[in-house]
Amino acid sequence: FSDTVTYQTIYEDEFVLQAPPAQERESSLSISAKFGMNFAAGKRLCLNPNSRDKEVKLFSTTRLSALNRVGKPYSGFKYGWHFTQISKKIPPDAEIIAGTTVVISPAYTKHVTHFAESTIPLWHALSNPGRYPVHSNADLILMKQGYSGELEWNTHVLRFLSRAGNVTSKVIDPSYFKGRGLVCLETFGLIGMGLHEFGFFANEAEGRTFRTRLMAQYRIPVIPPQSFRLKSRCLVLQRSRSRQLKNWNEIVRSIEDTNLFDCSNWAKDLHGKMEKMSFVQQVQQVANTHFLVGLHGSGLINSIFLPSNAVALDLLPHNYLEMEWHNFATKAGVKFLFLMMGDTSCSNSCKGNIFQTSKVSCRNVMRCNHSLKDLKSLQVISAQADFYSRVLPNIRHMSDSISYSDGRMRNAGDAPLRSPLSFESVK
């Protein structure tokens, strides 16, 4: 990248993830977890192209010590992967695939969060090609469980990553090797799940550049900044089917009553329809939003496309806290806040510590529709969001005619609405 100066201070040592040498017709493996990014590289990873399961095979007459790390609780290779070491040489009838192949294996397919956490970390490797020479020079990117029928959100992200590095990689799935027996990738790079505690990016600059480059590739326009006297744009997400916000209209009205945000005008025809929009339209809508509000769920993964200094608010079900998208968005330069909804009509069998979300039984609370009870706290958070997104970036230019700290916020004459968002030019 032309702006590699942004990344020069990330690594302070001589770390480089190379593919270790291997004996003839044997495999090798090396694993790294720098910055919570789980990558592996090696020689001759083998797989059965007629099976779309998670198994990959390594042939070595000596124990591959790196395999000791893959089953650890916080390993990015614990889920989505099944490694088998076979203590002999690669069979003579196996086909060796020349070049370099990066392999992706999400824990769950057709799910935007699990797909993102298994693909977007590749951006970190592409941003640091000297540290990850294998991942940043891939001839092929192999989607292990199959590429056909994936969600549009997922395919567009992967297509962007395939074109973002030093070389353009071809995206394939096991059908690329249809009719063949055992195939072994001569040089391979693996992407494990990024740890939720670290997010997708090593720092905010990396996240901002990801957002900027992706939008440029898909020609997604951003509405130019306007006067800070204008109301900021807010978007309250609404699912089309299950797990809806029962009092969505009341939530929108409460935010707009602060006289700080326009939630209903600027994208008035698109509220509640995000799931039916194209990937490009979703990103454009979010990239032009200053305050994103949504019930806890995968829709909040789009918060990584919010502009810098924007705010996302995660509405949490009763007695449930899962700090998942918080880390993804924060590393993209977004302020991410939480608010408990207080709706006890959705029962949660977990009555104790709200951090018990690793228990499957706790997640039953996610399956019903919810109402936000504490609308006053929502208005307080809305004021915070306005400060981060509008006041702070313009604080040197704000005149003494705009009162903020006394609670009056803006006068109606100081807060006209922005123009509605148009998608006519976006496909």
Image (tube, rainbow, N blue to C red):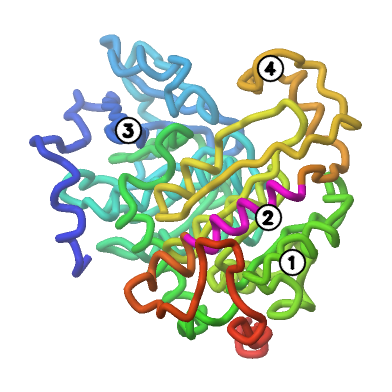
What's drawn in magenta, residue-wise? 375-387
Looking at marks 4 and 2 on the same chain, the residue that comes earlier in the sequence is marked by 4
- Label 3: how many residues lie within 10 Å, few (<14), some (14-19) or many (20+)? many
Spatial CA distance of label 2 from label 1 is 8 Å
- Label 4: how many residues lie within 10 Å, few (<14), some (14-19) or many (20+)? few
Spatial CA distance of label 2 from label 3 is 46 Å
Tell me if residue 182 comes above or below residue 139 in the rendering. above
Q: Nearest the camera: 276 or 372?
A: 372
Give the foreground label among 4 and 3.
4
Q: Nearest the camera: 427 or 379?
A: 379
Q: Whole-percent x and y of residue 112?
A: 62, 49
Looking at marks 2 and 1 on the same chain, the residue that comes earlier in the sequence is marked by 1
**Label placed on residue 379:** 2
Which residue is depicted at the point 34% across and 63% down?
209
Please indicate, yes or no, whether residue 219 appears anywhere in the rendered image.
no
Q: Is residue 164 left or right of residue 173?
A: left
Which residue is depicted at the point 37% across and 47% down?
201
**Label placed on residue 257:** 1
Give the foreground label among 2 and 3.
2
Spatial CA distance of label 4 from label 1 is 39 Å
Amino acid found under the numbered disc labelled 3: Ala
Q: Is residue 261 left or right of residue 325?
A: right
User: Which residue carries the number 4 mark?
Assistant: 359
Spatial CA distance of label 4 from label 2 is 32 Å
Please indicate, yes or no, whether residue 395 appears anywhere in the rendered image.
yes
Amino acid found under the numbered disc labelled 1: Asp
Tell me if residue 204 comes above or below residue 179 in the rendering. below
